[in-house]
Amino acid sequence: LKQQAEALVFHHSQALPRPSPIGMGSVFGFGGTGRWDEFENFVVDNDKMLEPSVELLKKLWKTHDSNEDGDLDAKELKCIIREYGEDSLTTCSARFKEVSEKIEKAKHKRDEVLLAVTLIPHVEMFKLMAHKCDEFEDEVFSLLDGDNDGKVDFREFSAKFGLILGFYKSKASGVTLKMISNLTDS
C-alpha cells in the first residue's frame, strides 16, 4: 500500500498527464471493485483546484491591485497567493476530512487511504501558499515578472499563474512523502 501511495504522489507531483484508467484500477487496488470511476472522478475534481478560471484570476486581481495602476507589485501578488491558498486549503481540507471519515468507517481501508493520498499534495501546497508565501515572495515574483520591470501585468499574471502553483507544489513534495509514509504505516 505504501508503494502504491508513493507512486500516486509521485504521479501527482509531476507535470505529466494522468495514466489511462485502462488497467490502472487493479494497479491502485480498485480493480474488480467497480470503484475506478469514483477514484478517477475524485482525482479529476482535485486537479480542478489547480486550474483557476480566468474569472477567478480577474476577481483576485481586482481585489488586490490596491492602487489600481493595472500592475501588481510583490506585496499585492503575495496577497493574491495567500488568499488563493487559504480558499483552496479550506476546500481541500473539507474533502480530506470527508475521506478521512470514510477511512474510519471502512471495513477495508485501502481504497479510502488511496483517495486521501491524492489530496495530500494539494493540502500541503495550499498550506504553503496560505501560511508561508512570505518566504517565497521574491522567487515567485521573479517567475511572473518576465521583463524584469518590477511589476506584473494581468497578461503575465494570468498566463503564468500555473507556474506559481507548480512552484508551491514542488516545495510541498518532501512534506507530502513524509505524510504519506506516516499514513500508510499506520
Image: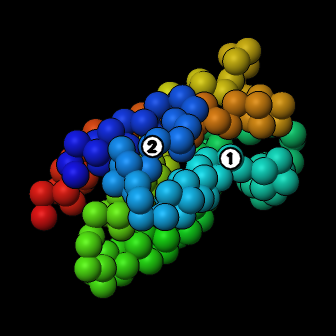
Which x, y percent locates residue 64?
74, 53
Q: Which residue is mark 1?
A: 51
* Residue 127 visible in rendering: no
Residue appearing at x 28%, y 45% in the figure: 4
* Residue 108 visible in rendering: yes
Residue appearing at x 35%, y 64% in the figure: 111
Kind of residue sitting beneath label 1: Glu
Which x, y percent locates residue 35?
48, 64
**Nearer the camera: disc 1 or disc 2:** 2
Figure check: 106 above or below 164 = below
Which residue is nearer to you in this view: 68 or 86?
A: 86
Quarter of the rendering containing residue 165: top right
The crowding category of the residue bearing disc 1, from other C-alpha atoms within 10 Å (few below 14, some 14 to 19, many at least 20), is few
The crowding category of the residue bearing disc 2, from other C-alpha atoms within 10 Å (few below 14, some 14 to 19, many at least 20), is few
Q: Which residue is mark 2?
A: 24
Considering only order in the chain, which callout, 2 or 1, is on the residue closer to the N terminus? 2
